[in-house]
Structures are given as C-alpha cells and as structure tokens.
Amino acid sequence: MRFFLLSLILAVGLVGGCDFGGGIQDQVRDQLEDARQRWQEQNLQDYQLVYAQQRGETIVDTARVFVRSGAADSISTSPDDIPDDELLVGTVESFFALIESRIGEEESQFGANFDTDQGFPTSYDATFEDERRDQDIITITLLESDGNNQQ
C-alpha cells in the first residue's frame, strides 16, 4: 500500500500541466476515484474533520469542522480570527473536489495522500505559477460523531 501512495504522490506531482496523451491524468483521476469510493463506502454523514492548513502566509493551526448529514454544520478555527473564505475545505467531499480541480490544471503542481482504509484525503499541497497562493492541508483527525455537535 505504501507503494500505491508513493506512486500517487509522484504521478500527481508530475501531472501539473503536462498531458502525456491523458494517460497520467487518467491514472491520477482513477486513484482519486478509488479513494473517493472507499470514503463513500464508509457512509459517514456525521463526523468531525480536524485539519491544519497554510494558504500563502495565512496559517490555520486547527480547523475543526462539524459535519452533519454530509454538510458542514459549524467550523471553529485556531487562531479564531480566520475568515471563512480563507478555509480551503469544509467536508471530506469538498476536500476531494479541491484535489480533483487540480488534475489537468496547467498553472499548478500538486500532491495528495489518502487514508488507506477509509479513503479520505490525509494531505494535499499545491504550488501555482499564477497569482494564487500556495496551499497545504494536513488532516489531523477524522472522528465519527453521533450527529450532536459538541464544540
């Protein structure tokens, strides 16, 4: 399984704007979809996603997202003065969407890792050749909840 993750990182990192007949992009998309399918098989609708991120110079030590019925119900951050529009993801599905949006994008190079059992993204980084700020996300923990928000 370690080889799978390493090959995904290398393939994703190389994809950026390169299109070798769509082959590498197709492989990366297939690996992403395999991870997404493993996540969806968990059928977790109520959970807490805790992650750290850096977007350019803006660092979020901890973003704690409470997800209920598959949608972000509430978010708390440390530091607590981080504007909502600085956060890169809310739900696990939005994390997948962010990664997917990089595939085939000519202005970026990125890498991603996924949990081997549950499939959710565990890390993501992207660098950009345009005016966008570089992005990094590391999943700290993902906890199943009973649907009752506890902050």
Image (cartoon, grey):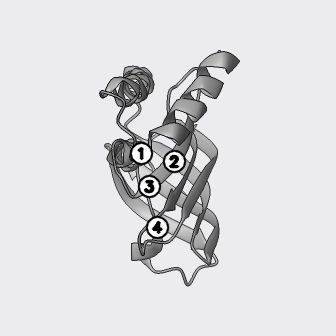
Answer left or right for 111 relative to 105: right
Task: Identify the residue under disc 4.
Answer: 87
The kind of residue on which mark 4 rests is: Leu
Give the secondary structure at mark 3.
strand
Residue at x-position 37% and y-position 37%: 45
Q: Quick one: which residue is furthest to the bottom in this view?
A: 81
Tell whether label 2 touches label 1 (CB within 8 Å). yes
* Residue 132: quarter of image: bottom left
Tell whether label 1 touches label 3 (CB within 8 Å). no
* Residue 89: quarter of image: bottom left
The kind of residue on which mark 1 rests is: Ile
Task: Identify the residue under disc 2.
Answer: 110
Of tags 3 and 1, which is closer to the observer?
3
Disc 2 packing (10 Å; few <14; some 14–19; many ≥20): many
Give the mark nearer the N terminus: 1 vs 2.
1
Inter-mark Cα distance, 3 to 1: 11 Å
Task: Identify the residue under disc 3.
Answer: 108
The kind of residue on which mark 3 rests is: Ser
Answer left or right for 150 relative to 36: right
Of tags 3 and 4, which is closer to the observer?
3
Task: Identify the residue under disc 1.
Answer: 99
Tell whether label 2 touches label 3 (CB within 8 Å). yes
Give the secondary structure at mark 2.
strand
Disc 1 packing (10 Å; few <14; some 14–19; many ≥20): many
Give the mark nearer the N terminus: 4 vs 2.
4
The kind of residue on which mark 2 rests is: Phe
Residue at x-position 39% and y-position 75%: 85
